[in-house]
Image: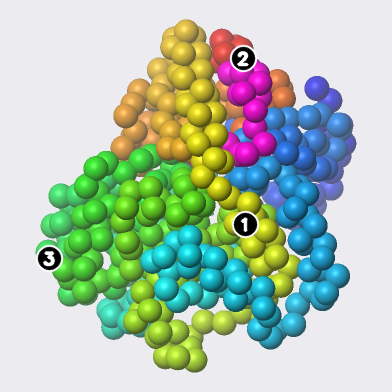
Amino acid sequence: MKHDRSKALFARAERVIVAGVNSPVRAFRAVGGEPPFIARGHGARVVDVDGNEYIDYVGSWGPAILGHAHPEVVRAVQAAAGEGLSFGAPTEREVVFAELVNQLVPSMELMRCVSSGTEATMSAIRVARGFTGRELIVKFEGCYHGHADHLLVKAGSGAATFGEPDSAGVTSAVARTTLTLAYNDVAALRELVHARGSEIAAVIVEPVVGNMGCVPPEPGFLEAIVELCKTHGAVSIFDEVMTGFRLGIAGAQGRFGLTPDLTTLGKIAGGGLPLAVYGGRRDIMSRVAPLGPVYQAGTLSGNPVAVAAGLATLSLLEPALYEKLEALGARLELGLASAAAKAGVPSCVQRVGAMITLFFAPGPIRTFDDAARQDKERFARFHRGLVERGVYWPASMYEAAFLGAAHTEADIDRTIDAAAQALAG
Ligand SMILES: *Cc1c(COP(=O)(O)O)cnc(C)c1O
């Protein structure tokens, strides 16, 4: 596989863009080597600038559930673009989009569109603080909620990949208002809430973690978050930027039958364009300006082209898609597990729906500490082996891989073969 053009572009990129990339994990630092530059994508495939084709399991880190360049999404975007790119004024499509989100995720009674998942979680936290008049927030180690200061504490994936769970530039005053607990530790949560419940504005959680690899909640964990928040007057926030529309049409909350106070959505919600949403209980969201005193705004919020992509994407989601993803996921899970067993690699495969991780440590992986015990070298070799064999896999052992509507059983089987060879090598 040749990478001459990618190498040349990367050398140019490194001179003018930090580390040559616009988001850290794209730099491939954790796995060695250099990233291929992507020229185009179609369905489950991406093609790099040297003409190498890959089966894609990154899916733009989540959004690409319908595959790349889905014709109906592209048509919607083109049509919207032709009508004008941005007005800074309300448009009809935003209403239709919000009505659809409310219909699919009924806990989102009142919402706001923003432009990134980071903005959505940052805003949800501000609203929770404004609503409760309290300062503390509780998060779980290994959960990533975007790069706002108060959420960049023990934040998994990108940060953890570089061994910087706490970012420089975050003041200690801000970090002190964020309390962190181990994921899945109900006893610790109960203890903390009983001790300091009257100071806690919000508990924020990835209902299934994707940002330390795929880690499901143990029975009772999410229920305890929702219940304890209710009892102590704190706001429960499900950060479904990754799980929303991925683990089912109503996200993780639909899958587990739970109703958080606030929810954040992004990634799939924007269909590949910069669009995210936060919302939930009407009484809480009514505190947002101009209805209430919590300020939040955005020049490009609810951008007409982004909303067109999101609306077209959400309109194409249907129960049959999730059944297909479940079946493909099970096939990949089984194949990866048996390939790893055959190669004698200490590992475990964890999957929820169309999110899957092969961990290079014996399972189960329940917490960030478990995930951090992986064999980094082995993962790096595995990743290089996959890329060389035409499988584009997340370049961090703390990231989940994603399946989409365009993957086929043949793709899965080719991937399992590639994995078997990569694990043997
Ligand atoms: C990706 C992600 C975010 C951040 O979204 P951006 O659009 O990258 O800012 C927040 N929370 C979760 C759970 C995510 O996976």
- Is residue 410 shown in magenta? yes
| Whole-percent x, y for residue 358 in the image | 47, 27
- Which residue is identified by label 2? 417
| Whole-percent x, y for residue 167 in the image | 48, 58
Query: In the figure, 176 relative to 45: above or below?
Result: below
Q: Earlier in the sequence, mark 3 or mark 1?
A: 3
| Whole-percent x, y for residue 294 in the image | 43, 85
Query: In the figure, 234 relative to 210: above or below?
Result: below
Q: Which kind of residue does numbered mark 2 sit on?
A: Asp
Which label is found at residue 111? none
The magenta region covers 398-419
CB of mark 1 near ligand 1 (< 8 Å): no
Specify whether residue 400 is in view. no
Q: Residue visible at 62% across and 57% down?
A: 315
Instruction: Classify mark 3: residues with Cα within 10 Å, few (<14), some (14-19) or many (20+).
Output: few
Q: Earlier in the sequence, mark 2 or mark 1?
A: 1
Which label is found at residue 195? 3
- Which residue is identified by label 1? 315
In the rendered image, the quadrant that contains the C terminus is top right
Q: Observer-nearest residue: 121 or 111?
A: 111
